[in-house]
Amino acid sequence: MGKTRDGRKPEKLTRERFEKELLGLQRELVIMQEYVRAKGLKIVVIFEGRDAAGKGGVIKRISERTNPRVCRVVALPAPTEREKTQWYFQRYVNHLPAGGEIVLFDRSWYNRAGVERVMGFCTESEYEEFMRSCPEFEHMLARSGVKLIKYWFSISDEEQERRFQARVHDPMRRWKLSPMDLESRARWVAYSRAKDEMFRYTDSRVAPWWVVNADDKRRARLNCIAHLLSQVDYEDLTPDPIELPPRVDEAYVRPPIEEQNFVPEIY
C-alpha cells in the first residue's frame, strides 16, 4: 500500500467502501456528461504514466457507465509507415472531440516524450521539435475551446515490480505485459528522466499536469475521478423521467420456435 504525501500509511480501503464511493462518483459522471452534451463542451483527458500504474483501470471505471457516444476512449496502436511521415500531431487531431463530447486518451501525443524518446524510436531533432511545439499545440486547443486535463499516474519501483510479477503468474492478465513493458522495467531511470524533462517543458498554466499517487489502485481511481469532476463546472441537467407510450394493439403471430437457432442453455 502506498503512503500519503506526509509519509503516513492510509487506512485500508475496503472493497465495500470502494464500491460505494465509486458508484456515487459514477453517478456524478453521468450527470456531468449530460451537461457536456447539452452545452456542447469539448473535453480531452490524457492518461499517462508508468506501465502497470493503473491508467486502464481508471479509464474503465470512468467509461463503464457513461454514454460511449458522448464519452469515448482512444487508445492508438503504433503508427503505420504512412502515419510516420505525417505531422506528428495529425493522427491525434483526428480523434479530438466535437461539441458535446469527452475523449479519454489512453496514452497520447506524449508517447514522443516517453517511450519514443527512451527507446530511440524518434530522432533527437524530432524530440526537440516536439518539446517546442507541444505547448503551442495545447495552447491552440485551449483557444479553440477544448478543455485539456492531463494526468500522470505515479507508481513506485516496488509496486510496479509487484504488479508485473502478478501478471507474469496470472494467465488471464499475462497479455498486459508487452515487450515495451518489459523494456520499460529495465529502463526505470531513463523513463524517470524523460518524465522530468517532459514536465519541465509541458507543465503549463493552460494545461498543467496532475499527478495521481497510484500505488493504491482503489484510492487512485477514486481520487482521479473525483478530481476530474472538479475540473468541470457542471450542473444537473438530467432529463425528467420518460413516460413510455402505450404499445399499439395489433395481431401478431410469432414464428415457430423450431425455425430459430437458439444458443445452448449451458448455465
Image (cartoon, rainbow, N blue to C red):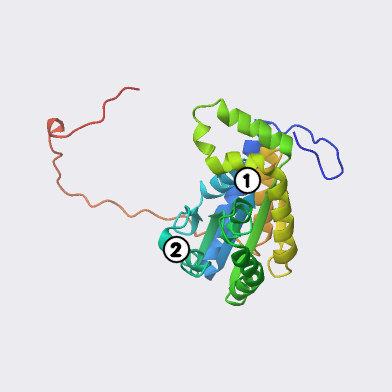
Disc 2 target residue: 83
Q: Using the image, determine if residue 267 lies above or below residue 24.
A: above
State the image coordinates of residue 17 (x, y, percent, origin top left): 68, 35
Is the C-beta separation of discs 2 and 1 under 8 Å? no
Is the C terminus in the top left, top right, bottom left or bottom right quadrant? top left
Say above or below: 185 vs 231: above
Indicate which disc, 2 or 1, sits on the residue closer to the N terminus.
Answer: 1
Badge number at residue 24: 1
Q: Is residue 74 visible?
A: yes
Tell me residue 254's x, y (percent): 15, 39
Classify 10 Å Cα crowding around label 2: few (below 14), some (14-19), many (20 and above).
few
Mark 2 or 1: in front is 2
Q: Which mark is residue 102?
A: none
Drawn side of residue 267 relative to residue 120, left or right = left
- Frontmost residue, 185 versus 50: 185
Q: Is residue 213 above or below residue 105?
A: above
Q: Secondary structure at mark 1?
A: helix
